[in-house]
Image: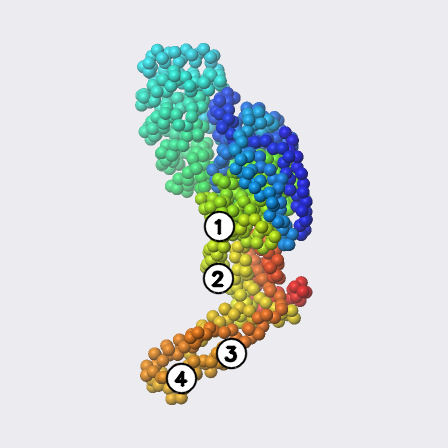
Amino acid sequence: MATVLIYRRFPRLSRATSFATTAQCKAESGSNENQQKREKNPERANTGTQSGATIQLLNPLGYRVSYNPSAYASSRAASQQQPASSGAQALGDALTSPGTSQAQHPFSSASSQALPPVGNALPKPKAKPLLEQSISTRFSAAPTKEEAEKGNRETHDSKEDPRCFQKGRPEYRSVSYDSSEPVETLPLEAGDSILHSVAVSKGSQSPGTTRDYFLRLSRLPAERRAALLSQPGFDALCLCAAGSLGLFSTSELIDVLKACVRLVLPPTHPLLTACEKEFCRRAWDMDLEQLLLVADCWRCLERGVPSYLSILFSYANVHWRDLTLPQFVQLVYIIGEGRRSPVDLMQKVESMILKYLDSFTLEEVGAICLGLFKSLSGISDNVMRRIADRVSLQMEDMSTYALVNVLKMLRYARMDHSALLKELGKVIPSRIPDINIQGIMHITLTCSSLHYFDEGVMAAVATSLPSKVTYCRSKDAAKFLWSFGCLDYEPPNEEEFYSSLIEQMHRKLHEFRKFPEHLLTGLLGLAFVKRFPEELIDYALRDEFVRKTRRSKYELKKDLFTLGKSVDIECPSYQGSRLPPQLYQEMTEITLNFAEQEIYVRPEIVEASSLLENMLGGPEYVKSHMILPHTRSSDLEVHLTMDGHPIPFNIKESIADKKLKDMGVSLTDELMTQLIKGRSNSQCPMKVGNEARIPDQERGEEAPTPCDHTTLPGAALTADARLQVEPKLGRGLEAPQSLTLNQHLPGVKLAIQVSNRNHYCYCSKRLLGLHRLKRRQLQLLGYVVVELPFWDWFPLLKRTRLEKLSYLHYKVFDPALLSRAS
């Protein structure tokens, strides 16, 4: 089915923005009808396992990819058509959110408009009900069977693909279920004969006979096995087995469980419940190979067995020194698939990784990393670096699937391994066209998470993505937008790239009800590169959506804060939904409180602020604060006249500084006499203190003079100090004349940025998207941005005070600043 892209161009500051609309788009996978088809699919039984998670999508512009195990697992996978009976269930994600099986329906983005920044923002569209109608009515239409089967499918099997490492050694056959093991198929009449025998014996058969019945039934043709679950004779066999499991030997019990895998019993089947209890009861009497094999069978059956896994991990913790290499890799695989990180075992896992690292195959290295990643198991930098060292030397020989798993763990460990990243830039670009969309997403997300920019990798992703975009889940589209925005990279095909992803965000709008964090992720990525799709922003800022964000497992207020304020500054003509003022106020207070504790106190900022105060004349000339709290970084604000003279503007800091100074009392001879004798011979200490410090007229008010001297010097000092800092009743402290006179002079506002490495891409001077956005918005608000780059300022912190002052003077009084401002 063809997809037609219609481009509309709107004026922008630096480029035209294109918006693609789909002229005809049918519903995608995920309907109840497709779910039923998946359960009854006879082709599934040939593998011996039920497909864990499959993505079924329409063919975009003739794009065809097939994976066996998948192109995600191998860069050399051939492209061919998939059979029309493939499963259709949306794939979940192990790291951030569970999968969704909601139906995917068309969303027309024909009315979508972008908000150009600063003065060119489009008005709110009159046809706003289209969005609401699309969500409420058009999303409710389920796809027909013909529509779901039309076109080719990109498939990633989240259950089979992680098991590819098991094909590398014959030893895995004893610790895992082998779905590829050849089995002689029995004729149909053999199944009828078995069920007849079960009915005749009425449950009196021996454990050995029962086991043989299960094994023989599991060898029936696929269509016959699928029909067994509805047969009364099979129910009777399962009931008989469940009642006598205690009489089975361990090997017989394992054979029954393996037969259940091939028969594709549903995870909640009563026989499986009975088997789990029996295996837990006798687990400590089994050997490690049997324990791992049973755990693998549970994974194939997609049944959660936390109690059994706890016993397995305890057993492995006791016998960990006896683990062979295949047993260890299989154990880490089970840890990952169980999404559990046994604390007592993880330190021992690290030592085993180091022990076997040079002996692992590259697929096993990928399996180890995937297991650690899925179970959220942190490992030491030393172990992660050793893994990365090995991969960087053999990346060319590594399958893409295994490599992506290593990148996931590298991202989770926040490990910047330059050799691996450089090699990635050499190996990956040529593989991108053959990689599954989720693999491409993880590669891109790893680069952005590690702030690593490689134009070859990003350009290859951008070139391949538009033709594959309809295979993107809501999360995939959002992560692509975030990654490109974070690295501030706009590819040569930027209009096609961004318009296709924005259109996909519209199509996936229904998924954002369940995963609101993905919508905000994508919109922030777009904001970094000055793109503001109006309808999506209007939807994200509505009260209804804001309420949904509160139910997310992520804290999304700061993302809403950044998005809302960015729209306010860059899109003045925007007329859509706005965030409530209470949220702005709450997040501003939270951000400023955090800054006071974590940002303003950083040595590089404290030193710059202190030196600027000394250089310019005092705290009234410098303000260390967040001009834009939603950008989450601080600024040093300085004002200059047009001829380059500093302007005092920070009245609050100046008054606070004077208050602190006025709290002291100068120790003159007369004051010492008063303290010793208990009375003053000439004048009160208040007057003495004032004369010794600040003339009365500079304070803007007459200094209060106490008319009564107390006989207690301590009381006199307390009273005088209080009178000195407190204004007269009904009056406030006024600004010094120098401040009030210069307050409204025309001039230049400087926003001085004390940058650090986290503001830039890895080992480069390429500014990240959030900080590019901040500087752009400061300029829109009339500020001239001056940077103290970390490559200059940090080394200067170790130099002399004179050198630092000289550098700051050069930066602040640069004549080019005034010419830019004028």
- Tell me the kind of residue under disc 3: Glu
Tag in front: 2 or 3: 3
Residue 452 placement (x, y as % from top left): 58, 47
Q: Which amino acid type is marked by label 4?
A: Cys
| SS at badge 1 | helix
Badge 1 density bin: few <14, some 14–19, many ≥20, Cα 10 Å = some
Label 4, on which residue? 684
The mark nearer the N terminus, 4 or 1, is: 1
The CA distance from mark 2 to mark 1 is: 25 Å
279 relative position to 141: left or right: left
Quadrant for the N terminus in the image: top right
For badge 2, the amino acid type reads Val
Estimate the x, y position of residue 396 in percent, counting from the top left. 60, 37
**Which one is earlier in the sequence, the residue at label 2 or at label 3?**
2
Are there few (<14), some (14-19), or many (20+) residues within 10 Å of tag 4?
many
Q: CA distance from mark 4 to mark 3?
A: 20 Å
Residue 684 sits above or below residue 116 on the image: below
- Of callouts 4 and 3, the N-terminal one: 4
Q: Which residue is mark 1?
A: 557
Sequence-earlier tag: 2 or 1 = 1
Q: Report the residue at 59% width, 35% height from top.
A: 470
- Classify mark 2: helix, strand or loop: loop
**Which residue is pictured at 49% across the width and 36% down the height?**
99
Question: Which residue is labeled 3 in the image?
Answer: 698
Does residue 617 appear left or right of residue 685 in this picture?
Answer: right
